[in-house]
Image (cartoon, coloured by chain):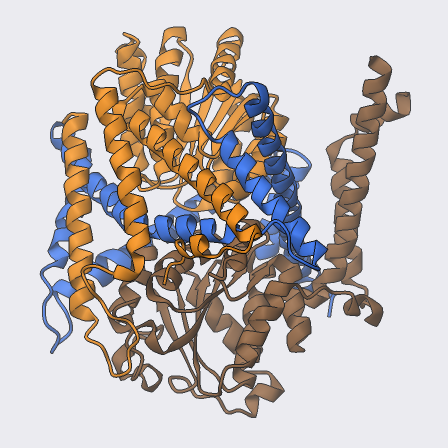
Chain colours: A brown, B blue, C orange
Amino acid sequence: MEFWQKLLAIDRRIIFIFVAFAIIVPLFIIAPPGFLKKIDVSLPVQSLYDYVENLPPGSKIMIAFDYDPPTTPELQPMAVSFLKHCFTKDLKVIMLGLWPQGPVQAQFAMEREILVDEKIKAKNLQYGIDYVNLGFQAGNEFVILRMGTDIAAAFPVDYFGTRTKEIPLMKDVKNFDNIRLVYNISAGYPGTYEWVIFAGDRFGVKIAGGNTAVQYPHNSPYVQTGQLVGLLGGMAGAAGYEKVSGYLGKATKYMLSQAVSHAMVIFFIILGNLAYFITRGRKV
Amino acid sequence: MGAFLTLGIISFLYKDNPWYKFCEALFVGISAGYWFCTVFWSQFVAKLWDNIYPTAGQPRQYVYLVGGILGLMMLLRLVPKIGWFSRWPLAFVVGGTAGAYLIGYALSNGMKQVKSTILPLWVSGNLNATVGNIILVVGTFCGLIYFFFSKEQKGTYGKVAKLGIFFLMITFGASFGYTVMARMSLLIGRMDFLFGTWLGLIK
Amino acid sequence: MNNRKISLVILISAIWLTLCSQILLAQEAAPPTGTKFDYHWFDTNRLNVFITLAIVFSAILWFIARAKKGKSLFIRRIAGLDAIEEAVGRATEMGKSVLYIPGIHDMNDIQTVASMIILGNVAKTIARYDIPLIVPIRQPFVVPVAEEAVRQGYLSAGRPDAFMKDNIRFISDEQFAYAAAVNGIMLRERPAANLLLGSFYAESLLLAETGASTGAIQVAGTANIHQLPFFVVACDYTLIGEELFAASAYLSREPKLLGSLKGSDLAKALIVLAIIIGTILETIGVKWFTKLFVVQ
């Protein structure tokens, strides 16, 4: 009894130490192949992969980077593996952001991960022809509405100050007509929800999302209704896409830490509830 | 610097301390400054100034003055006597957004969701689909009953509403699990930064 | 300027903006060859949406008209409101402040609007007991509205002298900087009651958890579904989703809010009816009813 009561009153800092160990130690361990095989590829992840896989080369994909540095551990791997998949399939990529730091994340992904990748180097990607970064525009969902009629009016210049209308890749892109998919990577507002309402349902363009785990349950009903082609949720979703596309990256690397820390949390939840019910029972 | 600030914020887990307070104050101050600059360049300069005084060869777009005037009206609240002017741009924002969202809500959250909830309660030869459909339909039904405010939640009706709240709590539990995953991910990212990027101990 | 005039301005703005956007859409969609989108003033493919909206809005206007005539519109008591009163009462007993966090969204979010209404009522209650009411704010637009709501609350309680403008504090536009600063307020000023009502995102658990660790009684409410679980586990009472709006209507007895709530109740009743009929017909293999809800 005394033990359980002490357990209930345990200093939370002790739990913090356990969780810290559960996260840090696995970072130094290389995950066994058996563990990697167990990474789950959910249905929404698979359907996004299948959709991109079946697009003809040269199709234009738009990626909206609607997040900032705090959520990069979850979202940057989603961007990197998706970009790698697109460029391997010879798709044209238009990047932009409704968050000020989004296009910076797009640049980081391109410079640090994509353009240095041996397989993609061979493709000899050209800025303005194979991909473009349109930068940030203020105005949240109203920017999306404007893009529905004229993308160049919504984004007059790109990330580097070049006029959008002068960029070869944007020559035959008036609005969402020639865009085969908008893939929104989002950490909040404006994000996937706004893209579904203002681009998908209003202008008929296909939308897919990559969300933080916090956002995922909120947006998953739109997968069931078909308003989203696919949806990646948190680090597990990112790892799922890395697995299915074959570009193992940071999400896969982090999954061992994720799994061990989850096991630790589950253990503490069970222990806490056990202690709660035992001590409550005695009091009664 | 990144490691110093990361450790400073994490030190809050032990207890509130001057190091944390310093990092917090620095974060608040820098972010306020960052947002001021972002808003100035992306809104005032890009949306107003550049459209009124565009580069050579581009036409002037005076329609953007409307936004500029509304912005000025917002600032008038600094002058108490004519501060009420600031309510007009506020009304403009509220009204405009409500108008823009109206159709979106009706279409995306109304029609399409209702259509997807109308499902057969028996799918021949597919027990998974049958059970799934029943849970979806009953859950939606009971949830809607819980949020019906025109009737007291008593008797059988109250029990249905209570079932609705059970469904909601199960949803919240799933949602909570996802958030634990999100928070762990953020911590993993920071630890990777500290032990990998900073100390170089992780390859 | 009174509420009536503000409402008129909002209405005119909304109509004007909708018209402008439609004109822009019609003009600027000068279609390149092969375009699949065709812009019209009226999209017949979405007739079902129009009819549904027409029914719901007619009902709302009818309910508003009834409320204005003084007819009684029943709304059940929201249990969360008792919890708010209890929280304020406890802060009074302890002689400590009440912290009111109106979410992190701007005034264009209806949750913030509802939160401002509840804030006005909370201010009215607090003014009677002479304890400080601290309102930290993230969005600059919200500051004047919150000031006005609290001032009106103190005025209604007959205590305009007790209103302290400095307690309505603009903190920061940055989400986590705001959260960090509010956590700081909780830890340093130790309010006895924390009321978190409005639109919250990733900062919700950070705030609620810190508040719980200080021992404050906490009442939360948001319509952001993904944040509700954190409030449920970390707060003493949570207003779930639409309860936030219902609470604001219940407190203010404002005809427009009451009418809107009753209208939305009618919409829910119609949805329930549609689901029941549709599900029965789908189960026996009849599909035409479901097709009524298909939107191109």
x%, y% of residue A10? 79, 29
Foreground residue among C204 and B171: B171
x%, y% of residue C134? 41, 24
At 47% from the left edge and 72% from the top edge, which residue is drawn? A107
- Would you identify the image quadrant in which residue B167 lies? top right
Task: Count up the numbered dots.
Answer: 0
At 26% from the left edge and 16% from the top edge, which residue is drawn? C71
Residue B128 shows in the view: yes
At 15% from the left edge and 68% from the top edge, which residue is drawn? C27
Instruction: Please tell me whether residue A149 is drawn above or below residue A90 in the rendered image.
Output: above
Instruction: Please tell me whether residue C119 is drawn above or below residue C60 in the rendered image.
Output: above
B106 with respect to B85 (left or right): right
> In the rendered image, which quarter contains the N terminus of chain C?
top left
Foreground residue among B34 and C43: C43
C26 with respect to C49 (left or right): left
x%, y% of residue C139? 35, 40
Foreground residue among B19 and A65: A65
x%, y% of residue C108? 31, 42
